[in-house]
Amino acid sequence: MKKLIYLLCLTLAVSGLLTSCQKVIDIDVNTSPSQLVIEGNITNIRETQFIKISRSVAYAATNVYPAVSGATVQVTDNVGNTYRFNETATGSGLYSFGPLRGVSGRTYTMRVTVDGQTYTATSVMPTPVRTDSLTLTKITFGSKSRTIVSVNFTDPRNVANQYRFIQYINGRQVNRIYVIDDRLTDGNRIKQDLYFDDDDFETDKLVSGDVARVEIQCIDKPVFTYFFTFRQQSRGGPGGGTTPGNPPSNIDNGALGYFNAHTFQTIDIKIP
Amino acid sequence: MFKHHSIALAVYTNSLLLRAHLTLYMQYTLGRLFCGLIITLCSLSAAAQKKFTLSGTIRDAATGETLIGASVIMQSASGRVGTATNAYGFYSLTGTEGAYNVTISYISYQPIVKTITLSQNTVLNIELKAGSELQEVVVRAGDRKNENVRSPQMGVEQIDMKLLDNIPVLFGEKDVLKTIQLLPGVKSGGEGNTGFFVRGGASDQNLILLDEATVYNSSHLLGFFSTFNADAIKNADLYKGGMPAQYGGRLSSVLDVKMDDGNNKNFAMQGGLGLIASRLKVEGPLIKDKSSFMISARRTYIDFLLKAAPDTAIRGNTLNFYDLNAKVNYKFNDKNTVYLSGYFGQDNIGIKDLFSNNWGNTTGTLRWNHVFNSRLFSNTSLIYNKYSYNIKLLDDVNNFEVKSLIRDFNLKQDFQYFSNKHTLRFGLQGTHHRIAPSDISISGTSSFNNLSIENRYGLETSAYFSDEYLVNEHLTLLYGLRASWFALLGPGTFSTYNTAGDVTSATTYGGGRIAKNYFNLEPRFSASYLFNGENSVKASYNRNTQNIHILSNTGSSSPTDQYVMSSNNIRPEIADQVALGYFKNIKDNTFEFSGEVYYKWMQNQIEYKNAARLIANANVESQLLFGTGRAYGLELYAKKRVGKLNGWISYTLSRTERKFDELNNGNYFPARQDRTHDLALVGIYKLSKRWTLSGNYIYSTGNAVTYPAGKYQIGGTTTYFYTERNANRLPYTSRLDLSATLEGKETGKRFHSSWSFGLYNALNRKNPYSVDFRDVPSDPTRTEAVQTSLFGIIPSVTWNFKF
């Protein structure tokens, strides 16, 4: 539906009805105390798995996020395994264990202890759904035409599936969240177009010779809800769209971020 | 096929109506009371001794249009009585036998004074001539003066449709919904938007009526234009408080828009060519003085421009909207008149081979005015209205079509009884609703599945009574009561949910069975105390309830807004409002001042959860949060009604807040439309016989929004941390709009034309629409706030004609 509104706005813009313009403004914001941020991923690939712990900063500060060192980090699964994660280098805030391969159907529990406070999250590794190909789709708005990447796969019937896609162009990550579920598309052949935001067209447009890479994840429902909410507020923010709020994390005790046990697949495509 | 469908529906509806009515003893009792009351009232006037009634209809002499709210004053040696014409131009006054001077007046018309001898019940039908500029002084002498001070009605604004010609608007497309946003207590839904908020209410809490039919979506093209083509509109009244008992079903306001009846004297045409759309209206008598018709159409032509584009891809795109208003009436005799009116409007937006989106309203109203006797007036209305949208995605793999609609059948009976000290209104209303939330259908192979969300049916019935009672020359009371009963009907399966949104139980009801019902009593009370002819104090209290809710958390209306009814999960929204006001006229009605304060409590307000899935969701009610709200404010209004320079200043100081357990730690937070200060200045200056200049200036505090209080990194991307909800403000909005109207030369012929030139946002100020945050492109270690503005300076020109 969001896509439709987006198309609608584009149509209006093309017709010159919306003569919108943008400018950078100064604003007054509140300053919140620093929050703990945890980003945990367990994949179904036998590799080193990482959990990153950092802190938030004030809005007006520079984008340097303090790493959290000296945390106790462990992941357990529902068949009795315990994996102790160690900080890769002191002061990095990046904790790793591996090689470790996540198994579909298992429930993973992450336990992080920082300054005596423990943060817990669970995530279920979904059954992988294989993406068979990436294709290119040409969309035309007025005189401008854009090439975008589409992900093609078949959704398994009668199971709720959630997917997350991360797009890279020439190795640089596209600053946009792609998550879908099969609420309205269960059991079908799916062609998911990875749109850009209008703004990103300038920097992220695909031209001949570019290599696009898409990382495909099958994710569980809470992680989907997390990223779905995230995406809802990422555009048309204050004044335009939905009132923004913090996405509902699957980590308890007020930590920001997520713990995501997901399947992993990447495919590259070269723009001819 | 559609016709067949609607007949089937009508039959089905009738059986539903019948069954539901039978189950409700109260309704039956009320019905009996009504019959008794009518019989009594019919016989009352016959029994009255030595008192006679003067009644009739007031019309425009040139067009035969009935005049709503015209003043009729009967003056004799012993005293005076006065009244105003009702929605059909009818009035009734009673006095003892004797000689009277009767003064009939109406704003911008030449008053008429008649001398009559009342020795029997008398019918006096009057036609008033429109006044020219020079006669404005005469108009002022008419006795409608001080009506604003005298009437116990508070929080009401009658919008003078002639005013619209001179108020500058976006693209020069005159619009009643944009004009009301310049009044105190009414806030705009957004830049150039027709959505509005009244006294802290949400945009779905406005009851918008077109010839009594509910218009669910009153906007075109994402809200930049309204569905009301000014050409076809006779009159619009906005009630923002002290709601009269005959209206119900929404919390915040009533905008009662009435279409022109059609010129019953002469055949006439008028129209205009504008920047966005052109308009044409044809009206005339079918049978002179008995029957007339009016057809008015408006269509945009942006897509004709698209078709002329050199690029074939642009040529294939669609972007248009149109409106069609039609009305016909037939006057059988002085006692019986029948009106049939309809509205049809649609928006079409599409990109060739990619998608199309159509939405629109259809309304139809059949009315029968019957004068039982000179004191008892009746109106019976049968009303149909529908709002629907249709979205098609034409992509070969991802094709689908979504259809959604909300449809009402409404039967309404209103009575008005006039006696000298009392004007009684009472009536009954029954509305059957059907909501088809989403039907998804696919063709061939598609990544989407066919899906049909169960229809929802509801029956809303109400009975009301009100009395405007002239206690003495100082005190007037307007009191009433509205009883409303809402039933959610089967067939359907109705679920309950836990806090996580999972189904905990589900009950299935058969067709016509009541799944859930609510009964509400809504007291309405207003009083005015007149110190002298030019000063009064008014107070009011009213309760309103609402059973149809839109799930939207944005200010502007979207074509895909979802409607839900009160249910086992959703309780009726309730608002209680108290208001106190001081009204003053000075210099013989040249200036009108008013100050009103209000406080409003709102219960069972609705928001939706983060990550809510509203579209095509059978369990949409699991996605909602319920809370309360409060709104209070001060409204100041100063108006100069006559003279070369006229206009008004309106200022509102207000606050509107919501409280939900699940949001903002359960504390009150400002609603998005909570703008502390709102100022509007409107000035119209008659420069010469042919030139009129006008301008309006608005200033308002920015919307309440949520800015980040911190930031962090997720997946290498800057992410924002939010604390208090809506604790920040967008920058203020300020805009100056100008326009100039040049009337064509008076040629003595019937043909008349005028040019309107407009300058929207003449100072080219970049007003905020939204603010987004991003990393500074040239320096990714910093973050910046980016404001999006919609409209810069926009000139417009419109040519209007009339003959």
Image (cartoon, coloured by chain):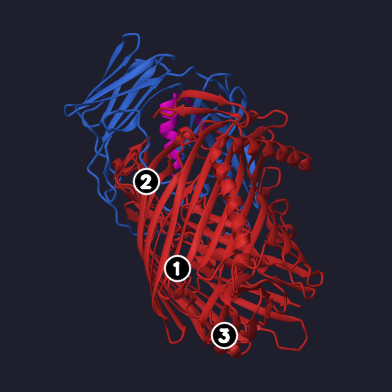
Chain colours: A blue, B red
Q: Which mark is residue B152?
A: 1
Q: Position of residue B209 (x, y in %)?
A: 59, 57
Q: Report which residue position mark 2 lands on.
A: B628
* Circle 1 chain: B
Between B361 and B534, which is closer to the camera in this rendering? B534
Picture layout, residue A154 above or below residue B396: above
How many marks can you see?
3
Q: Position of residue B285 (x, y in %)?
A: 80, 70
Say whether disc 2 or disc 1 marks the residue closer to the N-terminus.
Answer: 1
Image quadrant in which the C terminus of chain B is located: bottom right
Spatial separation of the CA atoms under disc 2 and disc 1: 29 Å
Picture layout, residue B556 above or below residue B687: above
Say whether disc 3 or disc 1 marks the residue closer to the N-terminus.
Answer: 3
| Residue type marked 3 | Val
Farthest left residue?
A116
Q: Report which residue position mark 3 lands on.
A: B139
Whether the magenta-drawn stretch holds residue A231 is answered as yes
Question: Which quadrant holds residue B795?
Answer: bottom right
| Residue type marked 1 | Pro
Work out whether disc 3 and disc 1 sit on a shared chain.
Answer: yes
| Residue type marked 2 | Thr
Magenta range is A213-235
Along the horizontal axis of the image, is A160 left or right of A244?
right
